[in-house]
Image (tube, grey):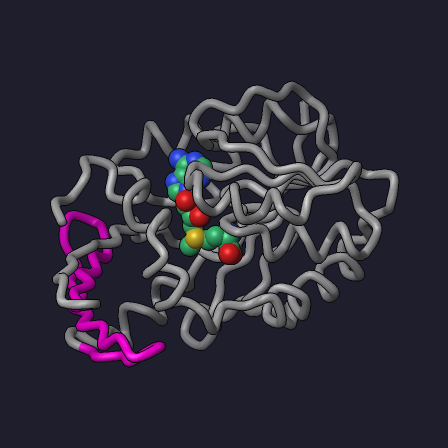
Amino acid sequence: MTQEKEWFSEWFNSPYYHILYKSRDAREAEYFLRNLVRRLHFSKHQQLIDLACGKGRHSIFLNKLGFEVTGIDLAKDSIAFAKTAENERLHFEIQDLRNLPYHEQFDVALNLFTSFGYFDCDDTNQLVMRQIYQILKQDGLVVIDFMNVDKVLSNLDLHTEKEVDGIVFHITKEVKNGLIIKQIRFTDAGQTYHFKEEVQILHLKDFERLFSLTGFDVEFVYGNYKLEPFNVDSSDRLIVVGKKHV
Ligand SMILES: C[S@@+](CC[C@H](N)C(=O)[O-])C[C@H]1O[C@@H](n2cnc3c(N)ncnc32)[C@H](O)[C@@H]1O
């Protein structure tokens, strides 16, 4: 299979992405969101948007908790799947983070499980942050749940093999030009596949800079789904919460 120019529209729309990451499931989403909703005092009249929602595991649970939620993603197959759960307070749309067709209508924008940093330049990071800013109401919150790159880099396995659902994924990782590049190769039903993931190495200071350039104040920084404080050496996640100011 040949690589598309934009790797993320190929890989994330493939069923194999969902097989490889099947442990990132509804249970994990529910645990994180129960903590987040409580800690940030979300209220039921607020409008939430789940940016890069995938198949909607976070959106669907937030809706079950009583929130009105819109989930958007570029991956059409993921959105088609998510749409089977739609109701009058839960909607999914195919949209691109770089061009969001909303204006000051959401109270909370969520960007969860490393759904940022796929682009190869900081201008696009800034563009996405500006899009998030313009879809939020004044005092709206943005929550970005990214990997803790410092921990990832200090534990980087250059070659791994992972068997899931009978498929052996051969994964190599390298660090190049400010990116963590993962090559994923496997064979299924006699066909050989090759996908890649490229995620920018973004530290807390990068999010602080992006937030400040856009007009967000950093309100909280957490280090895992239990919402414990961020520790650069030991935290699994980097979860940054910003508030829109004018
Ligand atoms: C790591 S997955 C996370 C999905 C979901 N948040 C979850 O936790 O299950 C990243 C998601 O970002 C989406 N994505 C990548 N680039 C995008 C873009 N430019 N606009 C919208 N979604 C995008 C992918 O299609 C994919 O579903």
Image x and y of residue 226, in percent: 64, 72
Identify the image quadrant of residue 29: bottom right
Q: Is residue 155 left or right of residue 231?
A: left
Foreground pick, 126 / 94: 94
Is residue 149 positioned above or below 124 on the image? below
Q: Is residue 242 left or right of residue 21?
A: right
Q: Residue at x 42, y 41 (%)?
A: 75
Q: Residue at x 74, y 35 (%)?
A: 107
Residue 228 visible somewhere in the drawing:
no
Q: Residue at x 24, y 73 (%)?
A: 156
Which quadrant holds the C terminus? top right
Span highlighted in magenta in the image = 160-187
Is residue 11 positioned above or below 233 on the image? above
Image x and y of residue 48, in percent: 71, 40
Q: Residue at x 63, y 47 (%)?
A: 84
Foreground pick, 212 / 153: 153
Image x and y of residue 68, in percent: 78, 41
Q: Is residue 83 left or right of residue 181?
A: right
Residue 216 visible somewhere in the drawing:
yes
Q: Is residue 176 magenta?
A: yes
Q: How many marks?
A: 0
Q: Is residue 60 left or right of residue 208?
A: right
Image x and y of residue 91, in percent: 67, 37
